[in-house]
Image (cartoon, helix red, strand yellow):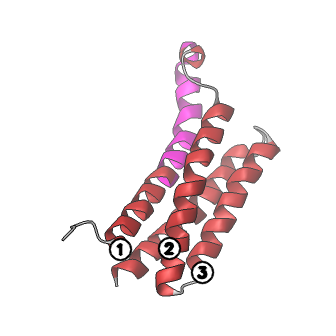
């Protein structure tokens, strides 16, 4: 019998989703500080906008699949709604530009992480 049950795989997707949300938060908080402290490093790192697009492109399918599976198994609608709103807020941060991108991205990341935590706990029960 395979030790990788569907709920274990679903839990893995939620853990990856939480990790990606955490990476977004660290990126939003630490990268501006790093640039301020070490101005010469700016040319060595990929642009902030590119990293945001890359993280969002990774987070969308993983989060969508994890939250959809959780809803399908447990019927909890709040987690996918929270996650969907979080992904929309993260997408909106790309449009706003640098002036408001950090607080908007942090809000979307926190919503997405909270959705994955709720989903993960529901699957663990």
- Residue 43, x across and y down, in percent: 60, 14
Kindly report the distance in space between the C-alpha atoms of the residues bearing marks 3 and 1: 19 Å
User: In the picture provided, is 9 more to the left or to the right than 63?
Assistant: left
The quarter of the displayed image where residue 46 is located: top right
Q: What residue is disc 3 on? A: 78
The quarter of the displayed image where residue 39 is located: top right
Q: What residue is disc 2 on? A: 69
Q: What residue is disc 1 on? A: 7
117 to 90, vertically: above or below: below
Query: Badge 1 local density, few (<14 within 10 Å), some, or many (20+)?
Result: some
Q: Quadrant of the N terminus?
A: bottom left
Between disc 3 and disc 1, whose residue precedes? 1
Contact (CB < 8 A) between labels 2 and 3?
no
Kindly report the distance in space between the C-alpha atoms of the residues bearing marks 2 and 3: 13 Å
- Does 82 appear in magenta? no
Task: Name the mark nearer the viewer: 2 or 3.
Answer: 2
The quarter of the displayed image where residue 35 is located: top right
């Amino acid at each position: 019998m395979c030790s990788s049950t569907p709920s274990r795989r679903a839990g893995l997707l939620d853990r990856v989703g939480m990790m990606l949300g955490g990476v977004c938060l660290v990126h939003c908080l630490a990268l501006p500080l790093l640039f301020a402290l070490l101005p010469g490093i700016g040319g060595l790192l990929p642009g902030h906008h590119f990293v945001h697009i890359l993280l969002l492109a990774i987070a969308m399918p993983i989060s969508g699949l994890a939250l959809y599976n959780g809803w399908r198994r447990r019927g909890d609608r709040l987690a996918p709604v929270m996650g969907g709103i979080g992904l929309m807020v993260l997408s909106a941060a790309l449009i706003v530009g640098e002036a408001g991108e950090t607080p908007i991205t942090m809000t979307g990341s926190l919503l997405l992480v909270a959705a994955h935590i709720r989903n993960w706990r529901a699957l663990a029960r």
